[in-house]
Image (cartoon, helix red, strand yellow):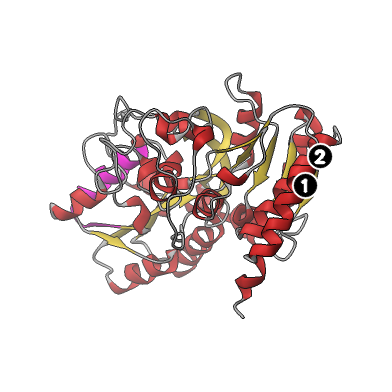
Amino acid sequence: MRYVDEFRDPAAAAALLKELRRVRLPEPVTFMEVCGSHTMAISRFGLRGSLPEGMRLVSGPGCPVCVTPVRSVDHALALAALPGVTITTFGDLLRVPGSTSSLERARAEGADIRVVYSTLDALALARREPARKVVFLGVGFETTAPTVAAALLEARAESLENFFVLSDHKLMPPPMRALVEAPDVRVRGFLCPGHVSTIIGSEAYRFLAAEFGACCVVAGFEPLDILRALLLLARQVAEDRADVENAYGRAVTPQGNRAAQAVMARAFEPADGAWRGFGVIPASGLAIRAELAAHDASRAFLVEVGAGRDHPACRCPEVLRGVVAPPECPLFARGCTPSEPKGACMVSSEGTCAAYYRYERLHPGATRTASRPAGGGPPSPEAGS
């Protein structure tokens, strides 16, 4: 038996759904998952269309590639155009549209852009090719930030002068605060991200329950994980309470990974961060500390970068806030497809539009409440989640 089999048992899933339908909700509720891996799993296993009447599940800003603003892509493209510069990146960023191009297109036109599987791969490349200036595109949440921090500290220890990071790392709690404070978002509770929570711990969401009365449950990524978390959320609503519960105890602790947090703190400091769909959120980003400035690509290379512009018809920013579902975008499955993406949400393996396109594609004019799964197959891993 594979380890995941016990978390995909159909009979157990049916029992959880039956129990979920028995919960008496005082009014219709909307829950939000804020993890791209959750979004893909929910779509893949048809969970959205199996929820009881009166319960709605929407997707949030859980895809790191999706929330990376166009200006950041433009910045990477400007660096790629410099002589002697090699850009290294996870593959999910290659096809994200910039204002006028993409990394994939720039590579086809001759820029030295290479896909790596870890930050240490980029570090090893810098060692092997000392004549090249190797820039790693640091896009991701708290999950990948510790590995980038470790690479920065190692580069300093080795005096590796040709290794740089363009940091656009983001922290998950600040946009969750922005969501509960936003007037156009009505979310009663959150499926809190599993990967991020292994680093920051379940108690990082306590402020949402204490200050805003939002229900929070940390969830794993298999069907039974998600259904169990939804059941706990529903019970909180039915009992008129707001709490932080951990339904992913096999990986997440209340305080998280202290060692990873310490490494992050040595290399990064909180900074205001720009998010697609949200604008600038205070203290939501991670900037490279001054003592590591020699490896900070934003300081080492002077390039002109404009404000950046999304496709004018793309509604990815609203999708990331849970205000609309992908089928409500006029480009969805028409002008915007995985082979010809107009927005980042259709590019990433954890993007909401990509998940809907692959598993929950609707006919034109259908609403988010009518969505049903359209296929199977495993979700692709997202390096930056």
What residue occupies the far top of the structure in this picture? Answer: 183
**Mark 1 nearby-residue class (10 Å; few <14, some 14–19, many ≥20):** many
The disc placed on residue 232 is 1
Does the segment drawn in magenta span residue 76? yes
Highlighted range, magenta: 71-87
Q: Residue at x 35, y 51 (%)?
A: 93
The relative height of residue 242 versus residue 135 in the rendered view (above or below) is: above
The amino acid pointed to by label 1 is Leu
| Residue type, label 2 | Gln
Q: Quadrant of the N terminus?
A: bottom right
Percent across and percent down for residue 96 are 32, 45
Q: Choose between 375 and 81: the one closer to the eye.
A: 375
Q: Is residue 372 above or below residue 315?
A: below
Q: How far across and down, in percent of the image, does residue 39 sit?
A: 53, 48
Left or right: residue 75 versus residue 272 is left
- 160 left or right, relative to 223: left
Q: Which residue is labeled 2 in the image?
A: 236
Confirm or deny contact between disc 2 and disc 1 (CB under 8 A): yes
Image height check: is 303 above or below 184? Answer: below
For image coordinates 14% across by 55% down, the residue present is: 110
Q: Badge 2 local density, few (<14 within 10 Å), some, or many (20+)?
A: many
Is residue 374 within the magenta segment? no
Badge count:
2
Q: Is residue 293 visible?
A: no
Mark pair 2, 1: CA separation: 6 Å
Residue 112: image x %, image y %?
Answer: 21, 58
Viewer-proximal residue, 238 or 17? 17
Element type at mark 1: helix
Residue 192 in picture, x, y percent from top left = 66, 46
Q: Quadrant of residue 72?
A: top left
